[in-house]
Every structure is written in structure tokens, then in C-alpha cells.
Image (cartoon, rainbow, N blue to C red):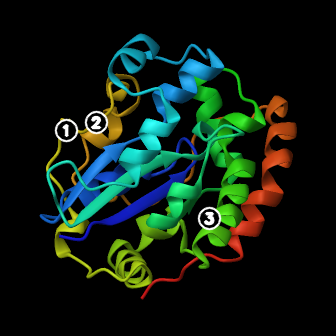
Amino acid sequence: MKTVRICLWSGPRNISTAMMRSFENRADCEVWDEPFYGYYLDRTGLNHPGREAVLELWPTDPKKIAARCAGSAPDGSPLFFQKHMCQHMLDGVDLTWTARCRHIFLIRDPADVAASFNATMGEVRPEDLGAVRQHALYEVIAANTGKQWPVIEGADVLADPRGMLTALCDALNIPFDEAMLTWPEGRRASDGPWAPHWYSRVEASTGFEAPAPSGHPRPDTLKGVIEACLPAYQALRAHKLSAA
């Protein structure tokens, strides 16, 4: 059976894990949570929560990771959804494998991302948010595949899950499935080993929640980070998908 590989490209503090839940709730789909996270932590030396568990349990060889991303779903499902963090794709990583996949670019206002990341980690650099890298990936993948792939804004999905997911599935040339709108609460075996540190909210969810204003403060120290990320976000936002 031919495998349709779907790569979601996101930065942190977005609805990427909810999107993974949505796709995983389809009977025809398997998921892989942040395939390159182990590689990223290994190469950068960053001390993220759960670092030791990630390095123990997640692959760190980018060539082997890429081969798996471009391969079949582990249990042979027709759809193989992969949640990728753009900042994990360090300079020099081979991206030719992306030509064998279909792609989604999930964006969020960098002011909201920076505030949320700062509240969790206490320090933010532009590269932590992945926006500049996301725009670069969009252009590289468009060149690799000869196609401009759908860009979706997290807030739009939260405001109209059915409409946005219907439009997204159409753009990916796969059928929409009602099962994508809700899912059972709780942790998944497919969640990365960092889940205890980051996934409490999505573990309590059973579907996409209505959008709400960010309650995180935005100290002046974030201004430079936001300004560095804003042009890339705006460039991608110009391509964003509308609800069906």
C-alpha cells in the first residue's frame, strides 16, 4: 500500500500537538512526534526539560531519521503524519527527503509565541521560535516538491476546526475524516518522552478549544525577538489557507 507522508512544520507553543491528536484519531493514520528532537538536543547541547530521556529514546542520526520520515508508517497505515519543529532542522540537514512528503506549515503570531515560550523557559532567542527557519523551509520544500503547500494559522483552526480541516485535507488531496474533530483525553504511546513537561493541556483536551487571548506578559526584553521573527511570519501568513 502506498504511504502518504504528511509533515507538519511548526514552531513551539502552537497547536501542533493538537493537530497530531487530530490526525492520529483517524483510523488510517499513524504519527511520529518531533522526529528530529533528539538530533537537535544532541547537536546544540541545550538543556531542555526531559533532555536525558529524549537522548536515550529518540534517534540522533539525521540521515537515519530522514530515511524513516521518507519511509512507510511503522504499522503500514495509509497516512504517516509527522510533527516537526522547524527549529530542530539545523543548518546543513539534508532536506531532499521532503520531496517524498506532503506538507503543512502551521503559523502563529510571534508575539504570542515569544510570550508563551518566555513564560515556560524564562529565556527566548529568535532561533528558539523557529519562524525564520520555517519560512526558509517553506521555500526549500517548495523548490524540492515543485509545489506551494498549505499554510494554516493555529487561531483559524481553533475558530473553525471543521472548515479549516476540510480545506486542509482538500489541499493535501486526502479525504476529510470526522474523527479529526475530537479525540479521547489522556496521554498517547506515540507522545515523545518530553510529554510530561509540555503536554498537560493537550492531554486534558478532547478536541480543539475555542481561541482565547494569550494571558502571558510581554516584557520589553521580547521586543527584539518578536521583531526578528515578524517578517518571516508575515511572509508565510500571506499564503495562509481559508476555511472551506
Q: CA distance from mark 3 to mark 2?
A: 26 Å
Query: Residue 100 appears at what percent x and percent y?
Result: 45, 65
The residue tagged 2 is 191
Check the picture and name the quadrant holding the C terminus.
bottom left
The first of marks 3 and 2 along the sequence is 3
The residue tagged 3 is 141
The crowd level at tag 2 (other Cα within 10 Å; few <14, some 14-19, many 20+) is: some
Q: Quadrant of residue 226?
A: top right
The crowd level at tag 1 (other Cα within 10 Å; few <14, some 14-19, many 20+) is: few
Give yes or no for contact between labels 1 and 2 (Cβ–Cβ under 8 Å).
Answer: yes
Secondary structure type for disc 1: loop
Residue lying at 60% horizontally and 27% vertically, measured from the top left: 119
Specify whether 101 is left or right of 215: left
Q: Nearer the viewer, mark 3 or mark 2?
A: 3
Which of the labelled discs sits on residue 188, or is there none? 1
Residue lying at 39% horizontally and 63% vertically, measured from the top left: 6
Q: CA distance from mark 3 to mark 1?
A: 30 Å
Secondary structure type for disc 3: helix
